Image (tube, rainbow, N blue to C red):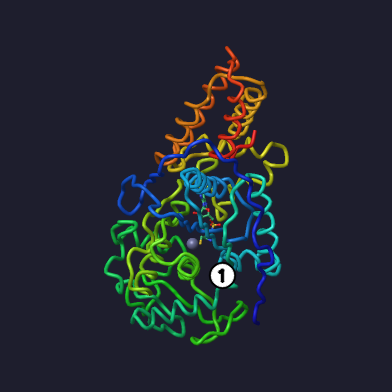
Amino acid sequence: MVAANLSSVRTWPSPSIPTLPGSGAALSLFDTASGEVRPTAPGATATLYVCGITPYDSTHLGHAATYTAFDLVQRVWLDAGHRVTYVQNITDVDDPLLERAAANGEDWQELAAREIARFVDDMTELRLRAPDEWVGVVESIPHVVRAIEALQQAGAVYDLDGDLYFDVMADRRFGSVANLDLDTMLALSAARGGDPDRPGKRHPLDAILWRAARPGEPHWPSPFGEGRPGWHIECVAIAVDDLGMTFDVQGGGRDLVFPHHEVGASQGQVMTGQWPYARLYCHAGMVGYQGEKMSKSRGNLVFVSDLRGDHDAMAVRLALLAHHYREDWEWHDDELAGGQRRLDAWRAAVSWPTGPPAGAVLDEVRARLANDLDAPGALRVIDRWAEEQRVRGGEDPSAPGLVSRLSDALLGVAL
Ligand code: 5CA
Ligand code: ZN
């Protein structure tokens, strides 16, 4: 079977972002590789790759929290005067998607198309900027093939019973993104889609690049025979094609640090002979529910689409922003009420014709966000202004409009 290209939905409409007086500070972010908060984006155009969904289940709050964090990254960059090029993938063919489709007894392409459509609605409602390039694996197979050929030329590929593997030892810097010991890497590889125990591999952490066709699985022709791409090379091929090497930020949830971003960085570096793959590796904490990480395999998911049914999406967004992106945190059923209370208070405060002066609010929100995205701190700054407005009011006719615009532009919360 040769599967068709299913990515009919290209992207979603980006929210309009108001401009603000003056300009914001340069963004610093915590970099997983160096373990430090470092400045980002030295050039005029800031470049961001964020790992996208595997569309076999709808968007849960963990996805939404991660994408909201990287939405703030872009808003801070834009406010500081950068142009932004944002790329995201869709893992529209991979083991978990095929397994879920088989379990549901449905076509994997139909499953993916349905979940991609739901993701589009969720992203739109949450006012997340759309990627400039939103690329499915299926459509990027020619790039994956070229990437594997470049790795072959670098002598970093071997064949194991028809499957092609990337030799991680071909990159002398392998290990420098996650900085983990071998036992931890082996355990994470086994837990996250790798096959460290497969006999015949040169190194247990070597990662599959091209999986030869198996009965009942979709496959595409290639110079290496019929098959489909491995997971990590998909993101590398898309990122390097759309952003080139040494883009500003590789983003995703912390579950992707190893092996996904570690192996991806090595593949990019070996494939091009350049270093580094990304200037900075930024990871959002894991959102849990009922005592465990929210994950499709555990089934403890809270879906954005379910919450949106009964609540204002801006209350959902405020509930997510109340947690620092880098923390692991747990969703509780009262979070949404907290987001709604805050939204109501802010909306009431900006509905007056005048208010307390808000220039310092803008400065402080900018400063909080520029410092490793302190969104909870930024929310408290606006809370204080809204409380001042409620208790004492103010005379400044430009203040309510300014607070409304800065909430929209910098936090993505439209009042
Ligand atoms: N398609 C791959 C990336 S190439 C993937 O990880 N897909 S995913 O659907 O499982 O996750 C999509 C994004 O949400 C990734 O950036 C992932 O790191 C993040 N994510 C997944 N689960 C959580 C969670 N519980 N909390 C926070 N972020 C999460
Ligand atoms: Zn990825």
Residue at (43% x, 82% y) in the render = 149
Looking at the image, which is closer to me, 243 or 139? 243
* Rendered location of residue 338, percent (x, y): 59, 29
Dot 1: what SS? loop
- Left or right of 131 in this view: 259: left
Indicate the amino acid at tag 1: Val
Residue at (35% x, 47% y) in the render = 39
Q: Place residue 374 in its image quadrant.
A: top left
Pointer 1 residue Cβ closer than 8 Å to ligand 1 = no
Q: Place residue 7 in its image quadrant.
A: bottom right
Looking at the image, which is closer to me, 112 or 130? 130
Looking at the image, which is closer to me, 218 or 308? 308
- Left or right of 104 in this view: 138: left
* Rendered location of residue 92, percent (x, y): 60, 67
Residue at the outermost top position: 392
Is 248 located above or below residue 378 in the figure? below
Task: Say which quadrant the N terminus sits in.
Answer: bottom right
Looking at the image, which is closer to me, 80 or 93? 80
Residue at (51% x, 30% y) in the render = 379
Task: Say which quadrant the C terminus sits in.
Answer: top right
Task: Classify mark 1: residues with Cα within 10 Å, few (<14), some (14-19) or many (20+).
Answer: many
Is 378 located above or below residue 384 in the figure? below
Residue at the outermost left position: 172
* Rendered location of residue 216, percent (x, y): 62, 78
Please name the residue that numbered disc 1 is placed on: 137
* Rendered location of residue 121, percent (x, y): 69, 51
